[in-house]
Amino acid sequence: MSSVSIITCFEEGTLDILRTWLSAVSCHTHIPVNIFVVKASTFSANTERSLKPLCGGNITLNIINVPSSMIKTEREHGSMLDVAVAHIVKSDYVITMDSDCFPVQDGWIEEMVNDLEHDAFVATSGILYPWQPPPQEMSRKKLEYRARSQYCWNMTHVACEITRYDEMMD
């Protein structure tokens, strides 16, 4: 199996959602995965320690604190994802997930990887949620641009997306 990293952004006041998300990912993930929780401020040492037991033996939890100077207020979420992808994540595949997008079935990662590895026409696989297209001035090299440019029904963004790491860096 290829190496997979999962990135999610954490927002203050949503620690219970993050704990539920980690538990769901751990419950339904049976391959080695690196999880990166990206945050605009720092976790307390106690909070970070309390999250580790929620991860099964296949999951390595990494906390990334993004300096406020690297976050653009009009696109906080996208800025934090860009930092994680550009500086931290090194794997064959990268999954970005909203922290309120929970896996509910075993084999969920394997199925998404399979879509990419066995269908030449699939560039991204994931779950969509109504949103809006990227602004024209947004750099096409940004992960947020790729996510927001995925058109489906009523203009969507991706709540859970898997992409080949190399393609994101092109």
Image (cartoon, rainbow, N blue to C red):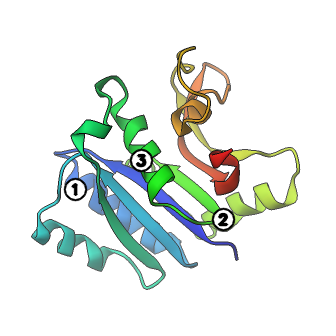
User: Looking at the picture, how far across and down is residue 103, in whole percent?
Assistant: 50, 59
Circle 2: residue type: Asp
Is 31 drawn above or below residue 96 in the view shown?
below
Q: Earlier in the sequence, mark 1 or mark 2?
A: 1
Of the numbered discs 3 and 2, the one sitting upstream in the chain is: 3
Q: Which mark is residue 76?
A: none
Please tell me whether residue 66 is drawn above or below residue 114 in the rendered image. above
Q: Which three-letter amino acid code belongs to the residue tagged 1? A: Asp
Gap between marks 3 and 2 measured at Cα: 18 Å
| Numbered disc 1: secondary structure | helix
Residue under pointer 3: 83
Q: Residue furthest top?
A: 136
Q: How packed is label 2: few (under 14 Cα within 10 Å), some, or many (20 or more)?
A: some
Instruction: Tell which tag, 3 or 1, sits nearer the viewer.
Output: 3
Badge 1 local density, few (<14 within 10 Å), some, or many (20+)?
A: few
User: Quick one: label 3 or label 1, which is nearer the N terminus?
Assistant: 1
Is residue 102 among what the camera can see?
A: no
Instruction: Report the mark closest to the observer, 1 or 2.
Output: 2
The residue carrying mark 1 is: 16
Please give the name of the residue rendered at 15% of the width and 66% of the height, measured from the top-left corner.
47
Instruction: Kindly check if marks 3 and 2 are in contact, taking CB atoms under 8 A apart as contact.
Output: no
Whether residue 120 appears in this view of the structure is yes
* Mark whose residue sits in front, 3 or 2: 3
Q: Which residue is mark 2?
A: 92
